[in-house]
Amino acid sequence: MDSAIKKLSSKLDKSRAMHKHREKPGILKKKGPHIGLYAKANNRNIWICWVTKSEQRLLRNFGIRVR
């Protein structure tokens, strides 16, 4: 579990969009067969990165909602 959190953390740190939208609320959104993490800013959803099912479960535990 600890290594999964470290992998997710490094994935988010490498994302360019995450640096700009760090303080915005996040949502998980299904788009086709993929699940993406998006930042909600000014009635727009800005893509941060794609996540796996296990990462989705971790993010839900941290309070990110699924849309």
Image (tube, helix red, strand yellow):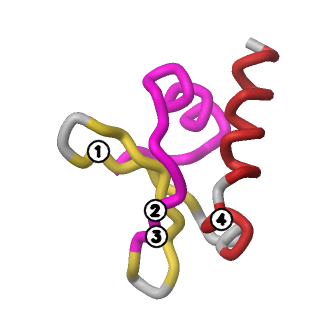
Q: Which residue is mark 1?
A: 30
Left or right: 48 in relation to 6: left
Q: Residue at x 45, y 62 (%)?
A: 47
Q: Secondary structure at mark 2?
A: strand
Q: Which residue is mark 4?
A: 16
> Where does residue 64 sit, x and y in percent of width and height?
55, 47
Q: CA distance from mark 3 to mark 1?
A: 13 Å
**What amino acid type should be assigned to the residue bearing mark 2?**
Trp
Label 4 or label 2, whichever comes before in sequence order:
4
Label 3 or label 1, whichever comes before in sequence order:
1
Left or right: 33 in relation to 39: left
Q: Are marks 2 and 3 in contact (CB under 8 Å)?
A: yes
Q: Which residue is mark 2?
A: 47
Residue numbers of the magenta segment: 45-67
Q: Is residue 42 magenta?
A: no
Q: Are marks 3 and 4 in contact (CB under 8 Å)?
A: no
Q: Residue at x 18, y 43 (%)?
A: 32
Name the front one of labels 1 and 4. Answer: 4
> Where does residue 56 sit, x and y in percent of width and height?
50, 31
Q: Secondary structure at mark 1?
A: strand
Label 1 or label 2, whichever comes before in sequence order:
1
Name the front one of labels 1 and 2. Answer: 2
**Residue 23, quarter of the rendered image:** bottom right
Q: Nearer the viewer, residue 28 or 65?
A: 28
**What amino acid type should be assigned to the residue bearing mark 3?**
Ile
The dot on residue 48 is none
Q: Which residue is mark 3?
A: 46
